């Protein structure tokens, strides 16, 4: 999702920073292709006007711990709370990924 939306937004004139993958080469390639940048999560978050959160649900705790409190930040979330096999929702029916994220980082401004 990030590797697709980031370049689209860069073509639309936004300055895009890529962060969070296992491969630094992938982030560098995306940055090169888009004229964007790659940076540590905490630095990318501090500088960002808006953040796309697009990781597998199993990575949420890790990426949020790197991101900090996200106070006042606009975060666009597209993550679906699925198990490792991407077959079964791990949350619900009385809550949702969006609600859990808002609970975990209440000071962020969430759009899901
Ligand atoms: N709302 C929607 O319409 C919609 C549609 C599709 C997907 N989704 C959701 O969007 C999210 C992202 O989907 P996606 O297909 O873009 O996921 P993805 O390509 O599998 O992973 C997204 C990013 O997370 C990184 N990542 C995965 N495991 C990691 C780890 N252990 N350590 C560090 N980085 C790791 C990946 O890095 P690597 O490049 O190193 O793998 C990649 O950069 C998921 O939650 C999915 O359910 C939503």
Image (cartoon, helix red, strand yellow):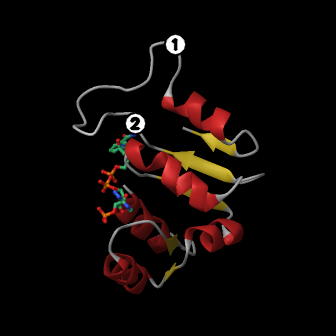
Q: Quadrant of residue 3?
A: bottom left
Residue, x 69% and y 72% (percent of image)? 47
How many C-alpha atoms fall within 10 Å of the one at disc 1: few (<14), some, or many (≥20)?
few
Q: In this view, does 37 lie to the left or right of 99?
A: left
Look at the numbered disc 2 and give the secondary structure of its residue: loop
* Residue drawn at point x = 37 percent, y = 47 percent: 56
Residue placed furthest toward the top: 94
* Circle 1 SS class: loop
**How far separated are the C-alphas under marks 2 and 1?**
15 Å
Q: Is residue 18 above or below residue 63?
A: below
Residue at the disc numbered 1: 94
* Image coords of residue 91 (percent x, y): 44, 23
As rendered, which of 63 and 93 lies closer to the eye?
Answer: 63
Residue 2 picture location, percent across and down? 40, 60
Left or right, residue 6 beside residue 67: left
x%, y% of residue 95? 53, 19
Instruction: Give the position of the C terminus as an image quadrant.
Output: top right
Q: Mark 2 points at which residue?
A: 80
Q: Is mark 2 within 8 Å of ligand 1?
A: yes
Q: Do the residues labelled 2 and 1 touch (CB within 8 Å)?
A: no
* Residue 61 horizontal/vertical position (percent): 51, 47
Looking at the image, residue 108 lies above or below residue 38: above
Q: Residue at x 40, y 36 (%)?
A: 80
Give the numbered dot on residue 45.
none
């Amino acid at each position: 999702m990030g590797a697709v939306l980031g370049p689209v937004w860069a073509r639309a004139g936004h300055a895009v920073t890529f962060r969070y993958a296992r491969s630094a080469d992938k982030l560098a390639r995306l940055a090169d292709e888009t004229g964007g940048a790659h940076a540590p999560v905490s630095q990318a978050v501090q500088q960002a006007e808006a953040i796309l959160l697009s990781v597998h649900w199993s990575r949420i705790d890790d990426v949020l711990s790197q991101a900090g409190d996200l106070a006042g930040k606009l975060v666009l979330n597209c993550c679906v709370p699925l198990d490792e096999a991407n077959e079964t929702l791990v949350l619900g029916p009385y809550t949702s990924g969006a609600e859990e994220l808002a609970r975990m980082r209440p000071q962020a401004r969430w759009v899901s």
